[in-house]
Every structure is written in C-alpha cells, then in structure tokens.
Amino acid sequence: MRAEFLPGQGIVYLEDGTRITARTSICATGVAYRTLGLADEERFLGAGLYYGAGASEAALIQGEDVYVVGGGNSAGQAAMHFSQSANRVYMLVRDASLKNTLSQYLVDRITSAPNIEVRTCTEVTALAGSDVLQEITLTDLRTGRQRTIRTNWLFVCIGGVPQTEWAQEVGIVRDEGGYLVTGPDLQDYRANLKWPLERAPLHLETCVPGVFAAGDVRHASIKRVASGVGEGAMAVALVHRYLNSA
C-alpha cells in the first residue's frame, strides 16, 4: 500500500493499483505480535503457543505449569493472572532482572507470589510436539546450557510492532516505537509537528488534519479490545465533527 495525505485529502493506492480518495480517514491497522522466530512456531500457534494472554485461557490452565515469555508489564500482569489458577508460573526473561523493564509494584507482587518463579537470562530456543506443543527448550544466555521442559502452555508477551511504515513516508508523526501520535500528545513532538490550522488537533487526530488513529496503533493507547472499540466509535464522531467544520 502507498499513501499520500494532505489536509482535507487522503489518497491511498492499493496493491492492485486501485486509487481511493477521501476527505478523512481513520487508521486502525493495529499491531503485529513479536514472535520468537523459531521453527514450528506457526504450527503450534493456538495449540499450546499463544501471543499475549487473556482471561479466556485462565480456565484452561487450572493446575498446570505455565511458561510466560517476557519481562515487561504485559508479561508480569499475565503471570499474576495465571498464578490464581495455575500450579506454577515460570517467567522467562532475557535480562538479568525485572527491575529495568517492569513496574516496581508488579515486581513486588511477583516476587511475593508463592507459585511464580522468574528465570532470568533465559530464552526459548526450540519447540516440539505432535499435534500440540509438548516440549520447549530453554537456553541459559550466560552459560549456553540447554534443557528441555515438558509443557503444553507457552504464552509470549514480548510486545508488538505497529503497522505504520506508510506513516513515515507521508510525514505523520510517530513515537519511538512507531505508534501514531495524536491529539494533545503531539505537543511532546513539537520539533516534528507541522500543524497548519489555528485550532488544536482533535483528540484522536494525527498531525495531518482529517487523518485519525484509533486502537492499538495509537501512541499511549490501552491495548485492550474494549478500548479499541471505544476509540473507533469516538474516531467516527470526530470525523463527523471535522467534516461539519471543514
């Protein structure tokens, strides 16, 4: 996809050459989960391997040993969530500690949970099984020592990559992670901001008037389905407001 965005006019060129022109647009392209980059990863997706973690899995892991990959807040929250029903939860972290990547309140809760074990300097380097995931190989990054663990539950919580490569090409402001910056948050990016109107950007409006963003793709958004749906509805209302004032 190729795009051109000007105030009041957006032009998108699809892969088949189709050209779409609109006065306004809403970007809701979301994020793609970061993967482990391992062989058979796609084969076990949904069959023992999961990206992210939600309430729907909690009922399935009752009394099981669960492995969570990641050292950020999403991984910490998943570990705490699973600890309520799992036999034991293992957090697999590449860094030497959680202090640099996890909120202190989560560090305190995790270290005090009796059935959560944090394994630092550790990464998953292989997956194995027949129809479902049955084994994972863990590698100690300090020594290179490997060991095989039997488990049917591996949750990868290492973040995602926003689908915003096109935005860089058309000059829409993104944050350091590639997420689209909107509304009041644009004030933190004054050096990159070229706002052509007298009014301030609307809450979900990017640095190009009439171009909005909603959901996971947006800077500082809450990465939850309910939040994304709410922002989508709000973006539609702001589009009508923009069109009525244009």
Image (spheres, rainbow, N blue to C red):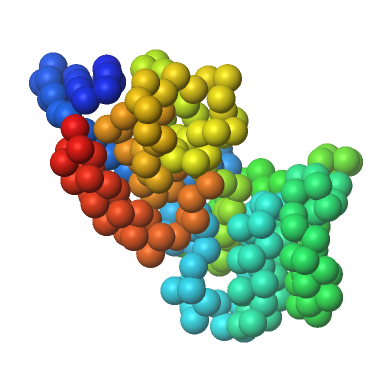
Q: Residue furthest right?
A: 143
Whether residue 60 sits left or right of residue 2 in the image: it is right
Is 126 or 193 nearer to us in this picture? Answer: 193
Whether residue 218 sits left or right of residue 233 in the image: it is right
Is any atom of residue 153 visible in this view? yes
Is 107 or 169 nearer to us in this picture? Answer: 169
Is 26 or 164 nearer to us in this picture? Answer: 26
Q: Position of residue 209 (x, y in %)?
A: 31, 29
> What residue is rendered at 53% in x and 39% in y?
185
Q: Residue furthest front?
A: 198
Is 141 or 95 nearer to us in this picture? Answer: 95
Quadrant where the N terminus sits is top left
Whether residue 10 sits left or right of residue 193 in the image: it is left
Q: Position of residue 119 (x, y in %)?
A: 80, 57
Relative to 58, does residue 244 appear above or below in the rendering?
A: above
Q: Position of residue 207 (x, y in %)?
A: 41, 28
